[in-house]
């Protein structure tokens, strides 16, 4: 009887150990399955900002050939305009007679060009002193007066706003504007010594 009771206790002890082992194994298996599930789950999809590469500002699109041609034409026109203006010269007539003038390169002549840019400049001249005719320009030009002895054909600025053209000689402080090159002293006398006249200056 004692042996039988001891055997039953031994069997029960063995069964309890087996149950405990099976419980631990089940727990470990459950933890392993959970870890595997977490590993297998896909991560959340990356955002648009994460998928797009970080790049510098995109370069400005190149101009089309047509735009480039138009730009070149516009640049060419802008470059030509100052050159055309530079090539324009003052033309002068005494009465109805055109005369050739070698104009000075100074501020007074440049200002005279500006006066003639949009329309001809008409100056009513009057005889004075038996050697010149003088008339009001209607505006003041830059002065650079120098003591000068004039000769027939000289064109000068007097008092900042008076145009003087000589058919004789005089000595005074003037700003030189130019000299008539295609008339002799006799030719200048014929143009200026026979009464008041009108001088026309144009830019072309």
Image (cartoon, grey):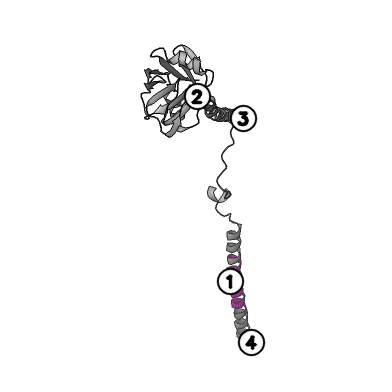
Give the alpha-carbon distance from disc 3 to disc 4, as whole Å.
Answer: 111 Å
Tell me, for residue 179, which label it has, or none: 2
Tell me, for residue 65, which label it has, or none: 3
Local secondary structure at mark 3: helix
Disc 4 or disc 2, which is closer to the eye?
2
Crowding at mark 3 (Cα within 10 Å: few <14, some 14-19, many 20+): few
Q: Is residue 34 visible?
A: yes
Q: Which residue is mark 4?
A: 3
Give the alpha-carbon distance from disc 2 to disc 1, as whole Å.
Answer: 126 Å
Crowding at mark 1 (Cα within 10 Å: few <14, some 14-19, many 20+): few
Local secondary structure at mark 4: helix
Picture coordinates of residue 18, whole percent (x, y): 62, 75
Picture coordinates of residue 97, whole percent (x, y): 48, 12
Q: Which residue is mark 1?
A: 23
Quick check: marks 4 and 1 in contact, CB under 8 Å? no
Disc 2 or disc 3, which is closer to the eye?
2
**Which numbered disc, 2 or 3, marks the residue that appears first in the sequence?**
3
Range shown magenta: 14-30
Give the alpha-carbon distance from disc 4 to disc 2, as whole Å.
Answer: 156 Å
Dominant SS of magenta comes to helix
Local secondary structure at mark 2: strand
Quick check: marks 3 and 1 in contact, CB under 8 Å? no
**Which numbered disc, 3 or 4, marks the residue that appears first in the sequence?**
4
Quick check: marks 3 and 4 in contact, CB under 8 Å? no
């Amino acid at each position: 009887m004692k042996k039988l009771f001891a055997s039953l206790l031994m069997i029960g002890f063995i069964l309890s150990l087996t149950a405990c082992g099976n419980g631990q194994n089940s727990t470990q298996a459950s933890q392993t399955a959970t870890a595997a599930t977490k590993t297998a789950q896909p991560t959340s999809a990356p955002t648009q900002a994460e998928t797009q590469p970080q790049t510098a500002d995109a370069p400005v699109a190149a101009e089309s050939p047509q735009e480039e041609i138009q730009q070149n034409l516009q640049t060419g026109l802008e470059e030509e305009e100052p050159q055309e203006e530079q090539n324009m010269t003052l033309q002068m007539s005494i009465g109805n007679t055109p005369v050739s003038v070698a104009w000075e390169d100074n501020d007074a002549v440049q200002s005279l060009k500006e006066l003639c840019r949009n329309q001809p400049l008409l100056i009513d001249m009057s005889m004075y002193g038996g050697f010149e005719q003088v008339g009001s320009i209607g505006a003041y030009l830059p002065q650079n007066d120098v003591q000068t002895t004039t000769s027939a054909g000289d064109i000068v600025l007097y008092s900042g706003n008076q145009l003087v053209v000589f058919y004789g000689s005089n000595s005074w402080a003037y700003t030189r504007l130019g000299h008539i090159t295609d008339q002799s002293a006799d030719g200048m006398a014929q143009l200026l010594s026979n009464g008041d006249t009108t001088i026309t200056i144009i830019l072309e």
